Image (tube, rainbow, N blue to C red):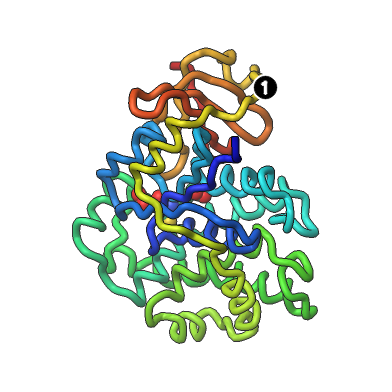
């Protein structure tokens, strides 16, 4: 049987999806592209995710990877070369990317909104009520603009300093996950007609060559795929075997096989219920059985998620 296809559930405007699209480009992969709505309802994605509502989601047969910090390590395991982690241990690269994204996500949205103005009211309502729990309308964000801009500029200043010895990417000659984590936040802020204004504000001229180099990684070879075909692919596959383990019993009082919920600890805090398969230093795997697709393994990173016994 041939290896299941890599499928990305995403929408064009999503910065975290852009991070994964570039990872697929870095690895030169062929992938199925399922276009999803920018906000729920997503009735053809929910059977795969058990309600996890964030984007992107990567599917490999009956294995579902939620969060880019589960997705990039999975791509690396499946297709080790070229590596997403040149010159930096994978765990360090993920940790640095996680810290960067945690610190900057709302600030980057604030800088974006400053230049872009208001998005449509239903979108703002959805983001406030069910995703960020913060009003990202222009009037609400604007008082924090100076603080947000300084916060972002501190990181881009570090980035410029890191690249100032002439290296092509953060880790040296080859692009990696930490480049992508910085890049997708800049991609959000500099989108539309905003690049000139944002570059001026943040002093990004030293980063122009790096920005072009990361963008030129491209997106690999996406092929449009329907959500129904992705569900069929999950139904026709079995989850890849995982050794059952709870490596952190002092933190999580659940054994493999127990019902648990896994919940993001920041945004879109929707609990996903399943039976614990494995939790170790870096990842959580739960099993769900869905009428439409059968058995699935859902994979989450440890960082940014909590597990509770169901
Ligand atoms: N830590 C998550 C963050 C993902 C995230 O917040 N994605 C945004 C889109 S870029 C999202 O889910 N927005 C709400 C939605 O699309 O429903 C990751 O690394 O995947």
Viewer can see residue 181: no
Establish if 168 lies above or below 16.
Answer: below
Residue 264 image position (x, y, % from top left): 46, 38
User: Which quadrant does the C terminus fall into?
Assistant: top left
Answer yes or no: is residue 90 visible. yes
**Residue 77, picture quadrant:** top right
Report x, y in % for residue 186. Answer: 51, 70
Quarter-of-image position of residue 140: bottom left
Q: Is mark 1 within 8 Å of ligand 1?
A: no
Q: Residue furthest left?
A: 121
Q: Which residue is mark 1?
A: 243
**Side of 220 relative to 56 (left or right):** right
Residue 203 in the image: above or below residue 274: below
Identify the element where label 1 is drawn.
loop
**Vertical comparison of 59 with 192: above or below:** above
Left or right of 155, for residue 173? right
Total tally of numbered discs in the picture: 1
- Quadrant location, the N terminus: top right
Q: Eyeballing the image, is 151 above or below 50?
A: below
Report the residue at 35% width, 49% height from top: 226
Residue 308 spot, x, y in % from top left: 48, 22
Task: Residue at 62% x, 48% y: name it.
Answer: 75
Closer-to-camera residue (96/216): 216
Residue found 31% across the figure and 60% down from its top:
136
**Residue 185 picture location, percent across and down:** 51, 65
Residue positioned 78% across, 70% down in the render: 173
Would you call the spot at circle 1 few (<14 residues within 10 Å), some (14-19), or many (20 or more)? few
């Amino acid at each position: 049987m041939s290896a299941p296809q890599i499928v990305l559930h995403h929408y064009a405007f999503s910065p975290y999806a852009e991070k994964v699209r570039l990872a697929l480009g870095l690895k030169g992969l062929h992938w199925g592209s399922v276009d999803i709505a920018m906000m729920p309802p997503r009735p053809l994605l929910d059977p795969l995710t058990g309600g996890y509502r964030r984007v992107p989601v990567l599917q490999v047969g009956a294995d579902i990877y939620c969060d880019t910090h589960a997705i990039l390590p999975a791509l690396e395991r499946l297709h080790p070369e070229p590596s997403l982690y040149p010159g930096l241990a994978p765990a360090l690269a993920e940790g640095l990317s996680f810290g960067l994204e945690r610190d900057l996500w709302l600030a980057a949205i604030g800088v974006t909104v400053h230049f872009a103005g208001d998005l449509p009211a239903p979108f703002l309502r959805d983001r406030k009520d069910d995703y960020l729990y913060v009003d990202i309308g222009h009037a609400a964000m604007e008082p924090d603009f100076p603080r947000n801009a300084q916060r972002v500029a501190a990181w881009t200043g570090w980035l410029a300093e890191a690249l100032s010895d002439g290296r092509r990417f953060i880790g040296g000659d080859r692009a990696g996950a930490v480049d992508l984590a910085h890049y997708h936040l800049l991609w959000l802020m500099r989108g539309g007609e905003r690049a000139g204004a944002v570059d001026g504000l943040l002093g990004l001229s030293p980063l122009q060559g790096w920005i072009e180099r990361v963008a030129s990684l491209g997106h690999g070879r996406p092929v449009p795929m329907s959500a129904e075909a992705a569900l069929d692919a999950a139904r026709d596959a079995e989850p890849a075997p995982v050794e059952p383990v709870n490596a952190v019993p002092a933190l999580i009082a659940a054994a493999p096989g127990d019902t648990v919920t896994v919940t993001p600890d920041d945004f879109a805090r929707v609990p996903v219920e399943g039976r614990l398969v494995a939790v170790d230093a870096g990842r959580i795997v739960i099993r769900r059985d869905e009428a439409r697709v059968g058995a699935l393994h859902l994979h989450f990173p440890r960082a940014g998620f909590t597990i509770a016994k169901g």
